[in-house]
Amino acid sequence: MPSRLWVATLALAGLAFVVLLAIGVTSGVTDAADRIVAEAIRDDSLADLLAPLRVVTELGSTAAVTIVAGLTFLTGVLIGPWLHGAAGAALIGVASLGVEAMKSAVARERPDVLDPLVVERGFSYPSGHSTLSMVAYGILAILITRSRLPSGVRAAAVTVLALVVMAVGVSRPWLGVHYPTDVLAGWITGAVIVLLYASLTRGVSREPAAAAVDADPATPRSDRPASG
């Protein structure tokens, strides 16, 4: 199966799952599972371990994601094609509008499973923090992965960004402002957007010989013949 067709199939499957999950949450099918997971996350034995989530959750806020959009553009300018950085920053903004439209379409009320630790307004499905953190930090991770930074730096940066996305998602039901299925829908929606971005911006390196040597210093390379 051609790569683009595979990406399109995977993206459609992800969106189909989000739609089916939306049907499940509006019909109450997922209520029992949501309650079990939410209560497990809020278990007293995890209180000290998860307490930092009250601060970490802000990394998925509109303000934080806006800053990340700016960093995405700057990253594109400094270590990657600037157009890819600009496209990533614009896509983060579009995703923010899209998630609000999804919330209004599903119109799921905020959870009453646990006493909320913070106050949030608006509808619940999908989690905006989870969606936008996946999109923003995921796109930034793509740009870093494609850069010519040392492999150790790239691996460390991507690992940190992945942990941030996970922590932001877990923080939402822990705070009592989202159902776990809201977070799951947000992660999948965001992952689909990142997947499409990665596919549409993928291109052949303009310096294939240099890239090969970066990957394996022992790779033989030839210089351009001298003129005359």
Image: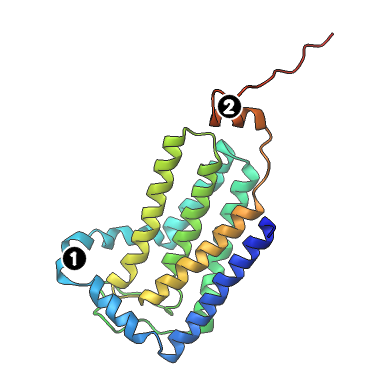
- Name the residue located 56 percent from the left edge and 46 percent from the top edge: 73
Q: Position of residue 116 (x, y in %)?
A: 26, 76
Kindly identify which numbered label has been placed on residue 46.
1
Q: Secondary structure at mark 2?
A: helix
Q: Position of residue 105 (x, y in %)?
A: 54, 83
Locate residue 32: give its quadrant: bottom left
Locate residue 226: give its quadrant: top right
Q: Secondary structure at mark 1?
A: helix
Query: Which image quarter is the N terminus in?
Result: bottom right
Q: Position of residue 134 (x, y in %)?
A: 46, 60
Q: Position of residue 208 (x, y in %)?
A: 66, 32
| Front residue (pair 16, 93) | 16
Up the image or down, 174 lies above or below 69; here it is: below
Q: Residues within 10 Å of mark 2 (few under 14, many from 20)?
A: few
- Name the residue located 49 percent from the left edge and 54 percent from the top edge: 138
Locate residue 130: give its quadrant: bottom left
Query: Which image quarter is the C terminus in?
Result: top right
In the rendered view, does 42 fall on the left or right side of 133? left
Kindly identify which numbered label has been placed on residue 213.
2
Spatial CA span between label 1 and label 2: 48 Å
| Front residue (pair 148, 54) | 148
- Name the residue located 56 percent from the left edge and 62 percent from the top edge: 193
In the rendered view, does 102 fall on the left or right side of 204? left
Q: Amino acid at mark 2?
A: Val
Q: Amino acid at mark 1?
A: Leu
> Of circles 1 and 2, which is in front?
2
